[in-house]
């Protein structure tokens, strides 16, 4: 799993940090009964997903590995040459 660098990107770290803050705010708001703050914390959690995805699209997410070839393209090329032969 570590070879795939799962979650070791700025986009992942930023998204998780923002989500953690949102969960913390919601958790504290549940202890001190404040419904508005609970919803605000949950909105921050949703914002974390949007920010993480935007950063990933902007190039700060997982990059394709140069060591592995595109598996679906390789399988399609194999089938094409097998049929042609």
Image (cartoon, helix red, strand yellow):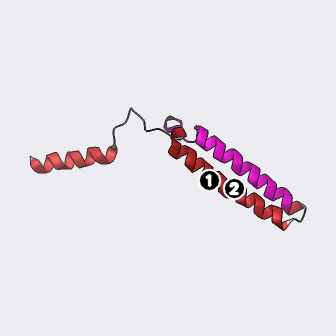
* Residue bearing mark 2: 45
At x 85%, y 60%, the residue is 29
Residue 49's label in the rendered image is: 1
Left or right of 41? Residue 76 is left
The quarter of the displayed image where residue 28 is located: bottom right
Task: Kindly identify the residue that appears in the image at 60 percent across and 38 percent down.
Answer: 10
The main secondary structure of the magenta stretch is helix
Vertical placement of residue 8 versus 33, above or below: above
Residues at discs 1 and 2 in contact (Cβ within 8 Å) = yes
Magenta stretch, residue numbers: 4-29
Residue 25 pos. (x, y %): 81, 54
Q: Residue 14 location in percent, x, y?
A: 65, 43
Cα gap from disc 1 to disc 2, whole angstroms: 7 Å
- For this view, does 15 lie left or right of residue 56? right
**Residue furthest to the top:** 67
For the residue labelled by badge 2, is the local secondary structure a helix, a strand or a loop? helix
Query: Residue at position x 85%, y 62% from top?
Result: 30
């Amino acid at each position: 799993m570590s070879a795939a660098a799962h979650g070791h990107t700025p986009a992942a770290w930023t998204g998780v940090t923002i989500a953690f803050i949102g969960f913390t705010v919601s958790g504290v708001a549940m202890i001190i009964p404040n419904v508005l703050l609970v919803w605000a914390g949950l909105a921050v959690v949703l914002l974390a997903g949007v920010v993480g995805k935007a950063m990933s699209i902007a190039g700060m997410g997982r990059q394709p590995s140069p060591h592995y070839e595109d598996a679906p393209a390789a399988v399609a090329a194999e089938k094409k040459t097998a049929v042609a032969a």
